[in-house]
Image (spheres, coloured by chain):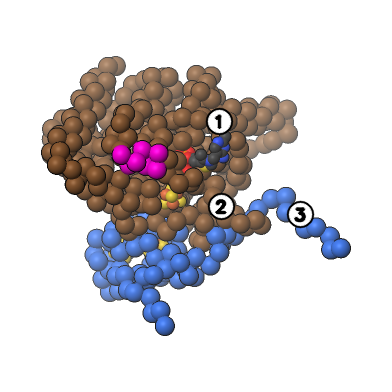
Amino acid sequence: MSVKIKDFSDVEYVLPGSAACAGCPSTIALRIVGKALGENAIMLMTPSCAVASIGLLPKSCYSLPTLNICFASAGASAGGLSLALDALYEKGRLKGEKPTVFNWVGDGGTYDIGLQGISAAAERNDDFIHFCYNNEAYSNTGVQRSGATPLHAITTTTPLGKEVHRKNVPLLMLEHRIPYVATASLAYPMDLYRKVAKAKSIKGFKYIEIHAPCYPGWKFASSDTVKMSRLAVKSGAWLLWEGEYGRLTLNNPTSLLAKGKMELLPVEEYIKSQGRYAHLMKSPDKKSYLAELEEEVKRGLKFMAGRAELI
Amino acid sequence: MSKPVVYPLSQPANGAGGPTGTWRTERPVLSPEKCTGCLLCWIYCPEGVISKKDRSINYDFCKGCGICAVECPKKAITMVKEGGQ
Ligand SMILES: Cc1ncc(C[n+]2csc(CCOP(=O)(O)OP(=O)(O)O)c2C)c(N)n1
Ligand code: SF4
Ligand code: SF4
Ligand code: SF4
Ligand SMILES: [Mg+2]
């Protein structure tokens, strides 16, 4: 399936004038996701920037049915809602195509606070899509570190830089061997659109994680949200891939980078304009910090390339 | 005493975050003669305020983030300081 931007629907599911920051990655991602899903969808959100972006009662910036649910409950709530719809169809009280049930949840709600419920829903193979927009921190409450915050990044709770590695939740989802799991980037909108359309067409549990560079949290210019997404992929700091029932495929350009057919951009190009790494750039040990981050990238690529060979 | 107003549900509407055009310090300005219609600005605009049809910009809600100007491959959008006075 090849999609072109001109074929994307001009119906908007995030309306102009939301309460999100100017240049917000969640809003960009959700506009594209909405276009790929269409109007027959129901969205659930845990506390996050996406909820704060809704705006003030009686208005909402989202034109899909939107439920605000409690933080730890993304897996159970979406699973329950989907089962309730199934029951109504079975009783004949609903007709037509079942709406796509999906979570729009941050990394805090996915990696940390909601992880057990999401894992349980994945294992039960509940019929919904869990989207994680990963801005690598608890942005809405003032940029605290999350399980998705990468090594050495400064947040308000890691003022000297995070000392431990981020988790790899998409990989964990792959190993739940669910019907579909994918990672995506704002800088590759056709790839994102294709993955969402694919997830929509599959019954059962689907997980899509979208890298979401957040300029107030990461301290870069609001105009560079998409540029930062692109640099993350080209430097190998964010990998693009998809998996079906545990079978992994790397997507371009990650696949080309893993095969050595495309040159990796130095990690420095990705982190140098992010204030959350300014302490590394100014450090007398800058070289060894950069070498450590380069090693991380190489490890990630090697690991996923090896994993992709497993049939 | 006036009756309390109860809104059980929020309804989708433009400007749920207020008149966000007032947030701008810089305004994106389109040079239509440079535009090839690739639609990258349209798909990347977080606010959805760029028209798919002719790339005209709804300044009532454009927040002035500048993503459209950075991403336009033809440099058909430039950021210009808002007047101020
Ligand atoms: C049980 C519970 N704990 C804490 C909070 C406060 N809280 C609201 S939003 C938020 C941050 C969410 O982070 P994330 O899921 O990554 O979304 P983001 O804000 O980054 O978009 C927190 C901690 C809450 N609402 N409920
Ligand atoms: S803090 Fe980041 S994720 Fe949250 S609304 Fe602002 S730009 Fe979006
Ligand atoms: S990105 Fe530039 S060239 Fe492409 S449609 Fe927008 S203004 Fe026109
Ligand atoms: S400045 Fe930002 S909000 Fe305004 S039109 Fe450009 S991308 Fe959209
Ligand atoms: Mg977050």
The reply to whether residue A68 is visible in this rendering is yes
Q: Considering the numbered disc 3 on the image, is that residue within a helix, a strand or a loop? A: loop
If the image is split into quadrants, where does the C terminus of chain B sit? bottom left
Disc 3: which chain? B
Query: What color was chain A assigned in the picture?
Result: brown
x then y, percent, for residue A126 = 55, 25
Q: Which residue lies furthest to the bottom in this view?
A: B85
Q: Is residue A159 magenta?
A: yes
If the image is split into quadrants, where does the N terminus of chain B sit? bottom right
Name which residue lies at 53% across and 67% down. B19
x then y, percent, for residue A151 = 29, 34
CA gap between label 3 and label 1 equals: 28 Å
Q: In blue, which chain?
A: B
Magenta residues?
Answer: A154-160
Name which residue lies at 61% across and 42% down. A67
Residue B6's mark? 3
List the residue tagged with mark 1: A72
Residue B23 vs A288, above or below: the answer is: below
In the picture, residue A181 is in which quadrant?
A: top left
x then y, percent, for residue B41 = 35, 60
